[in-house]
Image: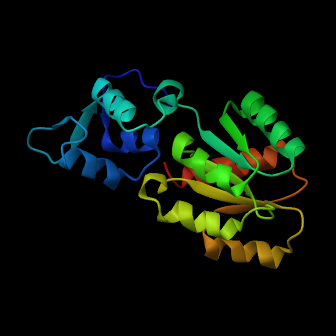
Amino acid sequence: MTFDKDVLTTGEVAKICNVAPRTVSKWFDSGQLKGYRIPGSKDRRIPVNNLMQFMKAHGIPLDGIHSGKTRVLVVDDEKDVTDILKKLLTEQADYEVRTVASAFEAGVECERFRPHVILLDIHLADGDATHIASIVQQNDDLAMTRIIAMSGKLTDGQAFSLRAKGFEGFLKKPFQVRQVVQAIEKANALVA
């Protein structure tokens, strides 16, 4: 999603900042995000340079506006898993990927990176994955972030119950890159 135009819709801004479109409307209506309304319409338009100023002022990463790539955060305390996923998802799927090994780091990186999708190992040593999912869901700035659980220890029934706890999908370890990409694309399609 790279932008060759100078003016964006609220939906496009929401995708770049990884927030809900209503959040962009609030920013616009409160005067925080400068733009204009289409004459005779309620539609809002935001010039790219105004968006960039707003993003810089509020610490929102400019990665989305420059790369247009899907941002994926991998949260797993097994370094070999994070290393392999980062390498393969960056090279084969052209995603922008960051990795962390703990629940605390996940929280910090979510605020900084604003991922579209989080691949979350539900057996982290330092945190409850369902708690992390609920925190992400309650944060308006991460309203568009989708979470996919990863585990090698759950039964299909337990995996299915994760949907009720805020997870968009589930990957059973070991998995193939194709399965991971399909899960990310499916979760991300719910946002677009």
Residue 132 placement (x, y as % from top left): 63, 63
Q: Is residue 144 above or below residue 164?
A: above
Residue drawn at (58%, 32%) of the image: 69
Residue drawn at (77%, 31%) of the image: 92
Residue 54 placement (x, y as % from top left): 32, 34
Q: Is residue 122 above or below residue 90?
A: below
Residue 13 placement (x, y as % from top left): 37, 39
Residue 68 falls left or right of residue 25: right
Image coloring type: rainbow
Residue 136 placement (x, y as % from top left): 55, 60
**Residue 70 is at least partly visible in this image:** yes
Q: Nearer the viewer, residue 8 or 18?
A: 18
Q: Nearer the viewer, residue 188 or 114?
A: 114
Q: Is residue 57 above or below residue 164?
A: above
Residue 2 falls left or right of residue 185: left
Residue 186 falls left or right of residue 66: right
Residue drawn at (56%, 40%) of the image: 113
